[in-house]
Image (spheres, rainbow, N blue to C red):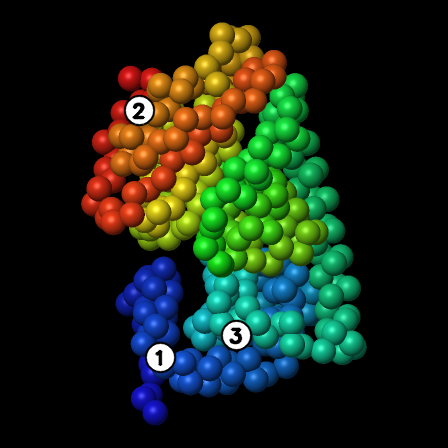
Amino acid sequence: MTAVRISTGIRASRNQAIVDIKISLCHLSSMELMLTQLRACAEPTRLRLLALMALGDFCVVELTDILGQSQPRLSRHLRLLVEAGLLERTREGSNAWFSLAQTGLGRDLPAKLPAIDATLQADRRQAERVLAERARAATERFRRDGAEWDEMRALGLPAETVEAALVADVETLSLPEGATLLDIGTGTGRILELLAPFIGSGLGIDASRTMLALARSRLSRARLRHCSVRQADMMRLPLPDASFDLTILHMVLHHSETPGAVITEAARMLKPGGTLLIVDLAAHERQDLTRALHHRWPGFSDAEMRRALTSAGLQAIPAATISGPIDIAIWRAIRPAGTTPAAFTLKAASIHD
């Protein structure tokens, strides 16, 4: 059996080390990978960590609170689980967040652990306390900062009707088994929750830590462990080309300085044959609302959106419109099969050009 060295060299940056780890794991045979992961989790604290991750994402500070162990000790256990491909690690400001891997033993093992074990039950009780405190703090911070997250209801828009139309649209897509979803500008994570039954894994991206905290609380309450969130700039997504079957921009583009470039970046994420869904305001003349809610654009016409989608290398499909105080449009576009990432450029100008 080939010996495997997982590279985390001092000279490499932390991000490069994680890339090296993933590359090393890709070269393992199925049996070698299984043995590597079994060795990594064959320790009580690491099994407890894996069981906890079934409840959602946690940072190191939260895990020290739950397990009552020192941060250096837990950091070592977490590093070993990440190196073995059982956990995934993402950076958010000064915090590192950990979640179960979406494939393999990391995804499947927690369900095999005995639910009646007294230690695991105690851990779950502590975790529920931490999750409740996280939700309370996020909501309090949200109220203090005065953020307006439920924009559709603030505008008097038919949110439930729009959600039902979005679900109906997704149901017609014939997504592959284990489909991957990217929700750009995820906000409170509502779209991840709404579409969770249709996907194998979902990732929400947002620049706001307050929103990410709310989204994590939502996903934890709903026990959606196949969905996670990450802090990132939607103009420069730290994700490889052609990674997702479905990408969604929900009530995002009218806040963007350069919506055409956001669409092009979203198109880059799509696998050949993948679908981009855009839910946004149709063109309107309510300048009072545009000013009051700090919108960058007064909605988009169908012609403007189709031009931007075509410019991003996608095949646009006529929009569906939902009537309201301001009409909402749902645009659909498909990345043609056989296209490569080279077909997509970031030269897209403003969608209103």
The numbered mark at residue 307 is: 2
* Residue pictured at 66% horizontal, 42% vertical: 138
Q: For this rendering, which residue is in front, 95 or 164?
A: 164
For marks 1 and 2 on the same chain, the one whose residue lies earlier in the sequence: 1
> Looking at the image, which is closer to me, 117 or 263?
263
Q: Which mark is residue 105?
A: 3
Q: Position of residue 83 (x, y in %)?
A: 43, 73
- Residue 290, given in percent of the width and then of the height, sits at 51, 14
Q: Name the residue at the left extreme.
A: 342
Task: Tell me whether the residue at label 1 lies in contact with that at label 2, contact meaning CB atoms closer than 8 angstroms.
Answer: no
Q: Amino acid at mark 3?
A: Leu
Q: Do we see residue 67 in this rendering?
A: yes
Image point 64% across, 28% down: which residue? 161
The alpha-carbon separation of the residues under discs 2 and 3 comes to 44 Å
Question: Is 337 positioned to the left or the right of 93 in the image?
Answer: left
Rendered location of residue 287, percent (x, y): 51, 8
